[in-house]
Image (spheres, helix red, strand yellow):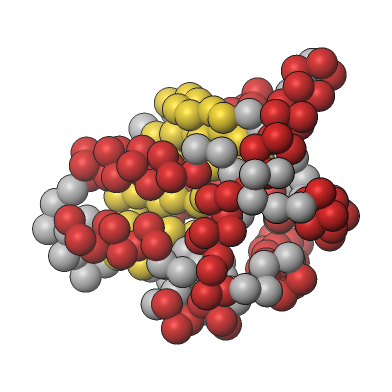
Amino acid sequence: EDLSQALSILFIRILIAGVLVFMSHTIFPFFKDFDNHISKSIPGFDQIDDIILSIFSYKDKSDTRFLDIGSSTCRLINKIKEINDSEFIYGIDPEVEFEKFGSQKISLQDFTETDFDMITSVFSNNFIMTDRTSLYKEIFRKLKSSGVFVCFEKIVEKDGLSQKINQECLFDFKIKSFSPSEIIEKQNKIKNLMIDHDSDYIINKLTESGFKNVHMIWKNLCFAGFVAWKN
């Protein structure tokens, strides 16, 4: 059983690192303008940092321990550091190109720090091709008993009509910044790399992983944010 668990952890570690590195090189080969591109692809993206900062205010103290998974350009990390000078604020991302922004090139499983007050993951979970419970349990393990996990994910609707309307509205949003061919090209690149779930699935998986108080805090078309308290 111990060997099986160790192999499962190794598999997840390799998978997370490999998929995110591949994603960065094939889908986002423009690291300098990364945040601007994402803001033009996800409606309401600029609201997300403010939501996270508001939740962070509940944990804001001199030795707050904060971790951002998939920190890319450290946009969020830098905003956290503007209001808190704790030495325990970390951003991790397996893509080497993001090291120049301050991200540590290391996987979640290899990151040895624990007892975090808050962990965030902004649109990284969809690219992890494994049972979501394994990821959530690892995050749960790294939190203090009073800790909180905040994640934002691309979601699907259970109802076909609602999903169709959301997708059409999203296309209308993207067409303001990209050509139809650019939108289709990106969709073709990521369709086999992403796994999207409905909001009930995500909430259920977070609950199964041990989180006690889980709810959706934000939604805009095909995207949603969730807050999960450990206790």
Task: Give the position of the N terminus as an image quadrant.
Answer: bottom right
* Percent coordinates x, y for residue 161 in the rendering: 82, 16
- 13 relative position to 161: left or right: left
* Residue 30, image quadrant: bottom right
Q: Is 164 placed above or below 135 here?
A: above
Residue 156 pos. (x, y %): 73, 30
Q: Is residue 14 visible?
A: no
Residue 99 against residue 213 in the figure, above or below: below
> Observer-nearest residue: 46 or 134?
46
Residue 165 place in picture, x, y as percent: 76, 22
Q: Quadrant of the C terminus?
A: top left
Q: Residue at x 56, y 81 (%)?
A: 97
Q: Identify the residue shown where x is 45% and y is 27%.
A: 217
Between residue 208 and residue 128, name the one nearer to us.
128
Q: Position of residue 92 (x, y in %)?
A: 47, 69
Quadrant of residue 8 within the rendered picture: bottom right
Instruction: Residue at 47% x, 64% y: name it.
Output: 71
- Horizontal side of 94 relative to 61 (left or right) equals right
Q: Is residue 188 left or right of residue 30?
A: right
Q: Nearer the viewer, residue 10 or 197?
A: 197
Q: Residue at x 76, y 71 (%)?
A: 26
